[in-house]
Amino acid sequence: MGRDLTALFDPRSVAVVGASDDPAKYGHAVAAQALRAPDRRPVHLVNRRGGTVLGRTAATSLTAVGEPVDLVVISVPGAGFEAAVDEALACGAKAVVAITAGFAEAGPAGLARQRAVAARVRAAGAVLVGPNCLGIADNTTELYLASDRFAPGGVALLSQSGNLALELQLRAEPHGLGFSRFVSLGNQADVTLVDLVEDCSRHEATSAIAVYAEDFGDGRAFAAAAAAAGKPVVLLTAGRGTASARSAQSHTGALTTSADVVAAACRDAGVELVRTPREMTVVLAGLAGLAGPTGPAGPAGPGAGVRTRGRRTAVFTDGGGHGAIAADAAEDAGLEVPELGGPTQDRLRTVLWEQSSVANPVDLAGMGEQRPLSYADTVGALLDADEVDAVLMTGYFGGYAASEGGLGGGPAGGSVLAEGETRAAKEIVAHLASAAGKPLVVQSMYPGSPSCRVLAEAGVPVFAATEDAARALAAMTGRPRPVDATRVAPLPRPAPPLSDPGYHGVRALLDAAGVPFPAAREITDEAGLLAAAAEFDGPYVLKALHLLHKSDAGGVALRLADRDALLAAYREMHARLGAPAYSVEAMADLTDGIELIVGVNQDPRFGPVALVGLGGVLTESLRDVAFALAPVPARRAETLLRSLRSAALLDGVRGRPAVDVAAAAAVVERITTVAAAHPEIAELEVNPLLVRPDGALALDARAVLR
């Protein structure tokens, strides 16, 4: 059930320690907000000098309040912070909001102080938000303990940045979006992002969770909590660059950036990952449209509508240029814009005139000025079509009423057209009411016009920018998830640590898990080489061991036909490289095979992250790879392989037969499960994994210990 945060969001009483009359102090802003609802619960202001604050008598200490206090906000200089916490706990506080800074963000000494305070809070059975946070608010319980007001609605906003939270509020206002809760995460010394996501998922008044986070703490736990939330989670994060891959010692590590890890976790958990505050607002506005015309709209925030899994989108326009641009934007957002079938086109021809285009995009071609209701007729026909999952309407709609309303634009003599357009908007809303949950998003040159307001007030998202409309629609339709990705896979129990991280030690580890390899023997001299060659027939492969990239160093010799060729290759390679050991292996049949790479990298936030892709010596150059949280079940692995740019190779091209993708996926599951059970392995890689029509065979393996 997660932690009980009732005292944090719906306390019986509140005290603000550090309340002040000085507008320059944060204690002034928080105290002023706390007093907005004095009748909901007792609010006590504490200032060590006493006197009055904001016209109310201030207690000189929490003890002087003379009664238990459920939640205490602490906004005092760092030197007095621990004493304030101890007094709060002694007075029975069950929740503390610590605005005071100067702890983990200030260095090791501050981190030690922070950990000590958090331990005392937990030992007392209380909860702590912060330190170094900017407060909290809950509109549903009239709890206002942040410096700014947040319009009421359905979005829970969990943010590590106060300024970003304010920007999101400003951007949300034009879309009628509001907030159920706001929490400034601070240093997450006790109450973590995971705790808050879990609690907000149980909060009936919250229908979407918006997160800005730089520090996930336990990223895998965040992904699991988001996957189980039962409501949309939208994430904005920073630090998505390549710095994390610079010190990697394998192809897997070099190809795995922080951005890849976060994107994989979000995809596996069903989280909407956004790049900017504007995109976050767009996605939230789209999710709000899921409520539909009969559900909550405007300030109520996102509705509880269920996102359709279909991505087939009909683009509807009143101008060819807008239609073409919208179709491109929709496909860029991951939507499909297929040509409409014959029956749907025939149905459209009954409501449009001859010059209209009905293929997709559907273009009125000027009919809107002759008959404004053609907008509604066309939307209705598209929503009724079984082959259409969603509709994106784009272009001039709104311009006729805009002219009448004094917003500029629009043709002359617009009053009749304005009335017709507004009536069309109302009929579009009526069509949506019976559209079986199919979403409609509108891009308009005049989004503030009366007819567009009719749509917006009914819950239809309306945007000025085409790319915003497409992104919102993508969020409303949902992203296809693998059949077995209903939750983040749990980690297996840790296995005994790997004792031999060398090449043959790693092979033995994977072989025990069922990963197939060619026959091989480790040798250190010519006698050992000849003995190995006698154990299995050629052709042979010779590898120099203990080299980081054997192929790059000329430490791999292939297709050595017999023992003489093997011995000659050994003498040449040993004279050149002087490696302490070598591996003699049976040469695999490469005919009709495709080389893949399978690797797992241990991420400090999200744990083991798997990579699959096109392998071999050109892996880093081609960068045709896909990621997922490990371990990866076989069906998920097959989905990842099918998502590669080069996936067509798996099914055979130019006369080559298809390879055994199921066998490759089974090997991916075994490799990623081994890696997930060995947290001491920083990087584990099989490259190449040879996949042929008759199965899969691992040809090389490497492990890098932490």
Image (cartoon, rainbow, N blue to C red):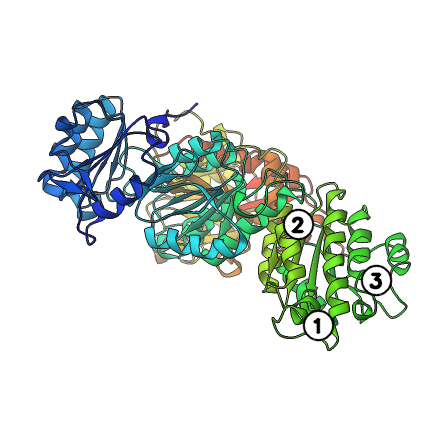
> Which comes before the other along the chain, label 2 or label 3?
3
Label 2: element kind:
loop
Q: Decide which of 511, 531 is in the foreground and name it.
A: 511
Cα separation, mark 2 vs mark 3, equals 49 Å
**Residue drawn 34% across the image and 37% down it:** 37
Describe the element under mark 3 as helix, strand or loop: loop
Residue at mark 2 to residue at mark 1: CA–CA distance: 50 Å
Label at residue 591: 2
x and y percentages locating residue 19 in the rendered image: 19, 42
* Disc 1/disc 3 C-alpha distance (Å): 15 Å
Mark 2: give few (<14), some (14-19) or many (20+) Cα within 10 Å.
few
Q: Amino acid at mark 2?
A: Thr
Point out the residue furthest to the bottom here.
Answer: 412
Find disc 1 in the rendering and name its residue. Answer: 321
Specify whether 132 is left or right of 443: left
Percent x, y for residue 83?
A: 11, 32
Q: Residue extending furthest front?
A: 55
Viewer-side label of 2, 1: 1
* Label 3 neighbour load within 10 Å: few <14, some 14-19, many 20+: many
Three-letter residue code for mark 3: Val
Q: Amino acid at mark 1?
A: Gly
- Asked whether 349 or 560 is in front, the reply is 349
